[in-house]
Image: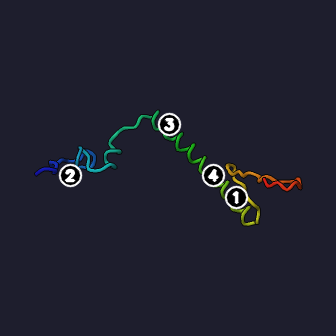
Amino acid sequence: MPGVYRKKNCPQCGVEHRKRGQFCSIACSNSFREVKPETRQKLSEIQTDYSAQTTARNIKRGEDNAKKERGEYVLQEDDWYVLPPVDDEDDGLIL
C-alpha cells in the first residue's frame, strides 16, 4: 500500500510503529541522542540570559502598572510626540 511505512521497533522504548524514521516519537528521538557538555552549557547560558531579560521586563511592567494605578502617566521609552506650531504673533496669518 502506498503511504504506509513498514513496521519497525523504536530503539529507545521498543514500541512497534509504522511512522517515518526509526523512532516512534520526537521524545524518543531526543532522549536517544547524546548532547555534548559544551552544547548543554551554551543552551543553559542562552536560557539564563532569556530568563533574566523576561524577569527584568516583567518587573518594569509591574512598576508601570503600579504607577498607572496611582494615577501617574507612564511615558514609554519609544513614545514620542510633536509639538504643534504655535502662532505667538498677532499678524492674522494662520500656520
Q: Which of 25 and 59 is in front in this view?
A: 59
Could you say whether the residue bearing mark 4 is in a helix, strand or loop?
A: helix
Mark 4 lies on residue: 57
Q: How far apart are marks 3 and 1 (CA)?
A: 33 Å
Q: Position of 84 compared to 21: left or right?
A: right
Could you say whether the residue bearing mark 2 is in a helix, strand or loop?
A: strand
Q: Distance between the residues labelled 2 and 1?
A: 53 Å
Circle 4 residues within 10 Å: few <14, some 14–19, many ≥20: few
Q: How far apart are marks 4 and 3 (CA)?
A: 23 Å
Q: Quick check: marks 2 and 3 in contact, CB under 8 Å?
A: no
Residue 17 image label: 2
Residue visible at 47% across and 33% down?
38
Mark 1 lies on residue: 64
Q: Which of 63 and 79 is in front in this view?
A: 79
Q: Which residue of the protein is positioned furthest toward the left in this rendering?
A: 1
Residue 72 image label: none
Amino acid under disc 4: Arg
Circle 2 residues within 10 Å: few <14, some 14–19, many ≥20: some
Q: Nearer the viewer, residue 41 or 18?
A: 18
Between label 4 and label 2, give the one nearer the viewer: 4
- Its colouring scheme is rainbow
**Image x and y of residue 44, in percent:** 51, 41
Residue visible at 24% across and 44% down?
21
Circle 3 residues within 10 Å: few <14, some 14–19, many ≥20: few
Mark 3 lies on residue: 42
- Going from N to C along the chain, the mark reached first, 3 or 1, is 3
Could you say whether the residue bearing mark 1 is in a helix, strand or loop?
A: helix
Q: How far apart are marks 4 and 2 (CA)?
A: 45 Å
Q: Position of 28 compared to 68: left or right?
A: left
- Going from N to C along the chain, the mark reached first, 2 or 3, is 2
Could you say whether the residue bearing mark 3 is in a helix, strand or loop?
A: helix
Amino acid under disc 2: His
